[in-house]
Image: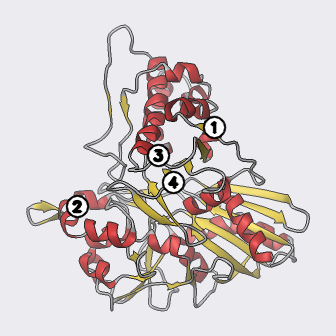
């Protein structure tokens, strides 16, 4: 491990990179750019151009590598559940990058029944047992099941996560995949620690026609080499962004509960027993933690924000939602009624036909009422999620992280009141839980 490294978080909304000196324990420089724009289709498609992901990596981490000849190592974490199919050689993309936000499976029929209903009966129980995942739209296993005829027409192919694709696009001929990313596909078995032919067949996928990435569970070994910024560097980590964030926040050592508030959102907890439909996630060191994922957060808030901002702009003003949202006071949010359902997308935690606004009363319906109710409804979800665990996580504290926790100061005090737990303030060296998680892994590898 070189004395300075590049840390990269490939998130759903932003790509963030830090050039960090391990020798001096400080940030040398940082860069970020918007994540590639997804093409949204009428059938629920959410697809990205594979090349645009490489370009985003070059625009951030590549700038550090080209500027400092001493940089030899890059640590990366990535959004989970996205995938693409590539040629058997691993060089030519056969599909776009299909994001975790893709919802096309929701509208697919098999005969007289909806595909998701059929998969709920045939695949869901085994998926939960083997992979620790709840069946939901957006998972690679679901998207392949929904479009198996189309994908079969492509012929033999290799499935790749975003990390795998960045490796091969950078020139690595034998990329290796961390289990946290593999598990996000729905084809990986937590029981065996390997790809599951049983899950593939239940999804209608021929295990002989679809090659899966080579697995590597040791975070202390590189996944491959890439040519980035005009030079060749080692790529390490390749872990899921949730796992990196949890590691950076100190779960489970600092507290047994981690609430991540981002574009996607999760509650991750160290518990001895989980209730039905609570997921299991393998973390960076191989440990297993329980999780409730796809809790509507930034993605859902943006749906309501777009409507409010459009009304404001059509009336001759400017966008106002996020400014007003960040200025809300904790006491006003706590006194509001949670009257807004944020489950506006099919993969959401408690989706049932879409979101809604209730308890609208003449004389009380105002922008202020709406904003406070939306904030209270958003944060109430996490108290309800925590109650879903069969055994409550030990202790009386929790950690809160993610970009939205820093964007709105009311989040921590409101969550403290709703959860009956005290928030633990974590000192982030890089400013991001994900990047701190990668930094901790880099420091361990150096030792």
Q: Percent position (x, y) of residue 345?
A: 35, 48
Which of the marked residues, 3 or 4, is nearer the chain's N terminus?
4
Farthest residue toward the right? 24
Circle 1 sits on which residue? 407
Which type of secondary structure does the marked residue at label 3 adopt? helix
* Neighbour tally class for label 1: few under 14, some 14-19, many 20 plus, Cα within 10 Å: some
Q: Which one is earlier in the sequence, the residue at label 1 or at label 2?
A: 2
Q: Are marks 1 and 4 in contact (CB under 8 Å)?
A: no
* Callout in the foreground (4, 2): 4
For residue 270, say whether it is visible: yes
Q: Label 2: which residue? A: 116
Please give the residue where the numbered disc 3 appears in the rendered image. Answer: 299
**Is 400 rendered above or below residue 229?**
above
Distance between the Cα atoms at labels 1 and 4? 21 Å
Q: Earlier in the sequence, mark 3 or mark 1?
A: 3
Kindly identify which residue carries mark 4.
268
Pointers 3 and 4 in contact (C-beta within 8 Å): no
For marks 4 and 2 on the same chain, the one whose residue lies earlier in the sequence: 2
Dot 3 and dot 1 residues touching (CB under 8 Å): no
| SS at mark 4 in the image | strand
């Amino acid at each position: 491990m070189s004395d300075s490294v590049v840390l990269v978080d490939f998130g759903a909304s932003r790509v963030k990179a830090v050039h960090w000196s391990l020798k001096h324990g400080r940030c040398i420089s940082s860069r970020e750019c918007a994540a590639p724009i997804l093409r949204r289709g009428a059938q629920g498609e959410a697809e990205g151009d594979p090349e645009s992901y490489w370009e985003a990596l070059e625009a951030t981490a590549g700038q550090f590598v080209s500027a400092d000849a001493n940089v030899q190592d890059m640590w990366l974490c990535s959004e989970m559940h996205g995938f693409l199919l590539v040629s058997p050689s691993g060089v030519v993309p056969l599909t776009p990058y299909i994001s975790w936000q893709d919802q096309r499976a929701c509208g697919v029929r098999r005969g007289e029944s909806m595909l998701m209903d059929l998969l709920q009966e045939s695949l869901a129980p085994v998926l939960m047992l083997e992979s620790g995942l709840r069946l939901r739209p957006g998972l690679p296993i679901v998207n392949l099941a929904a479009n198996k005829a189309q994908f079969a027409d492509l012929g033999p192919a290799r499935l790749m996560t975003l990390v795998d694709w960045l490796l091969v696009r950078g020139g690595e001929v034998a990329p290796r995949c961390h289990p946290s990313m593999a598990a996000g596909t729905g084809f990986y078995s937590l029981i065996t620690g390997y790809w599951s032919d049983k899950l593939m067949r239940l999804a209608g996928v021929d295990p002989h026609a679809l090659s899966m990435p080579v697995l590597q569970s040791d975070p202390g070994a590189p996944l491959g080499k890439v040519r980035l910024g005009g030079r060749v560097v080692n790529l390490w980590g390749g872990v899921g962004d949730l796992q990196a964030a949890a590691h950076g926040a100190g779960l489970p050592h600092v507290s047994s509960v981690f609430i991540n508030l981002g574009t996607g959102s999760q509650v991750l907890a160290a518990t001895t027993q989980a209730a039905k439909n609570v997921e299991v996630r393998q973390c960076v060191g191989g440990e297993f933690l329980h999780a409730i994922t796809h809790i509507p957060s930034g993605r859902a808030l943006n749906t309501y924000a777009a409507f409010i901002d459009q009304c404001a702009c059509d009336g001759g003003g400017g966008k106002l939602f996020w400014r007003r949202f960040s200025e809300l006071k904790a006491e006003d949010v706590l006194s509001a009624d949670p009257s807004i359902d944020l489950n506006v997308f099919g993969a959401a935690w408690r989706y049932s036909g879409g979101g809604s606004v209730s308890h609208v009363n003449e004389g009380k319906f105002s922008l202020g009422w709406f904003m406070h109710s939306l904030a209270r409804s958003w944060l109430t979800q996490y108290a309800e999620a925590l109650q879903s665990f069969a055994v409550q996580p030990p202790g009386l504290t929790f950690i809160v992280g993610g970009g939205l926790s820093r964007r709105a100061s009311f989040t921590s005090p409101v969550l403290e009141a709703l959860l009956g737990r005290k928030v633990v303030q974590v000192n982030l060296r890089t400013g991001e839980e994900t990047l701190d998680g990668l930094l901790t892994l880099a420091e361990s590898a150096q030792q």
